[in-house]
Image (cartoon, grey):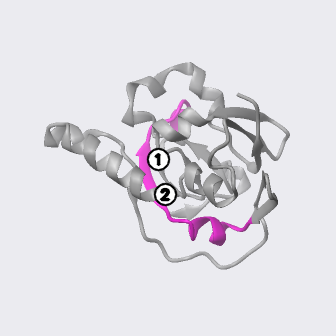
């Protein structure tokens, strides 16, 4: 999956003039010092049962960074984390038609598979290279590369930017 994502991003960049390719907010692989092993922050319910992750385990799946605007200008910034596709593949949900992303406060949204196949949606673990605290809408947050595709400006995606994420499970689309 990572190889396919990298190839698609590279092909997209080649199809554009250099200035346009640089202006797109396309997530790029980043290497950061690993976080210390810590408590479980995410549970993913898959066909083989539940898989629990710490921040370090999530980042071990590979980290990508993107500078993006959000629907809330105060939240614009540089976000880093594994792709949602990588997390779902690792937990056995890579082929799910949709997933429900659940926040600490019980808020949840269904994300269709087409979202993580079309865009490199992140399960962000850091903002501006720092782990996110609860007061910063962390420790996990769904981040779409909003500036990468004009389609992501559509308000129907607004509620899919779930923060305070604690659980992901398979869902009907």
* Residue at horizontal 46 percent and vertical 36 percent from the top: 118
Please identify the quarter of the rendering in which residue 95 is found: top right
Q: Is residue 97 left or right of residue 170?
A: left
Q: Is residue 155 above or below residue 132?
A: above
Q: Is residue 170 above or below residue 35?
A: above
Q: Are marks 2 and 1 in contact (CB under 8 Å)?
A: yes
Residue 61 falls inside the magenta stretch = yes
Q: CA distance from mark 2 to mark 1?
A: 7 Å
Residue 76: x and y in percent read 49, 41
Q: Is residue 17 left or right of residue 10?
A: left
Residue 119: x and y in percent read 46, 39
Pick whichever, 119 or 66, lies toward us. 119
Q: Is residue 148 left or right of residue 110?
A: left
Residue 52 falls inside the magenta stretch = no
Pick whichever, 30 or 78, lies toward us. 30
Q: Is residue 75 above or below residue 46?
A: above
Q: Which residues are magenta?
A: 53-74
Residue receiving disc 1: 77
* Residue at horizontal 54 percent and vertical 41 percent from the top: 116
Which residue occupies the extreme top position in the image? 155
Q: Secondary structure at mark 2?
A: loop
Whether residue 22 can be seen here: no
Q: Is residue 143 left or right of residue 93?
A: left
Q: Is residue 105 above or below residue 127?
A: above
* Residue at horizontal 54 percent and vertical 30 percent from the top: 71
> Quick one: label 2 or label 1, which is nearer the N terminus?
1
10 Å crowding of disc 2: few (<14), some (14-19), many (20+): some
Whether residue 99 can be seen here: yes
Q: Secondary structure at mark 1?
A: strand
Which quadrant of the figure contains the C terminus?
A: top right
Residue receiving disc 2: 128
Residue 135: x and y in percent read 71, 51
């Amino acid at each position: 999956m990572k190889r396919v994502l990298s190839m698609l991003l590279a092909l997209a960049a080649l199809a554009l003039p250099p200035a346009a390719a640089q202006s797109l907010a396309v997530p790029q692989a980043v290497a950061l010092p690993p976080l210390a092993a810590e408590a479980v922050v995410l549970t993913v319910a898959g066909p083989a049962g539940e898989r629990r992750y710490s921040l370090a385990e999530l980042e071990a799946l590979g980290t990508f960074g993107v500078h993006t605007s959000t629907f809330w200008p105060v939240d614009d910034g540089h976000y880093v984390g594994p792709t949602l596709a990588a997390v779902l593949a690792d937990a056995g949900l890579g082929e799910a038609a949709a997933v429900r992303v659940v926040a600490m406060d019980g808020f949840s949204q269904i994300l269709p598979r087409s979202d993580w196949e079309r865009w490199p949606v992140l399960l962000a673990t850091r903002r501006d290279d720092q782990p996110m605290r609860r007061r910063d809408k962390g420790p996990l947050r769904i981040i779409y590369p909003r500036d990468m595709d004009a389609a992501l400006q559509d308000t129907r995606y607004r509620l899919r930017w779930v923060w305070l994420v604690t659980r992901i499970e398979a869902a009907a689309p």
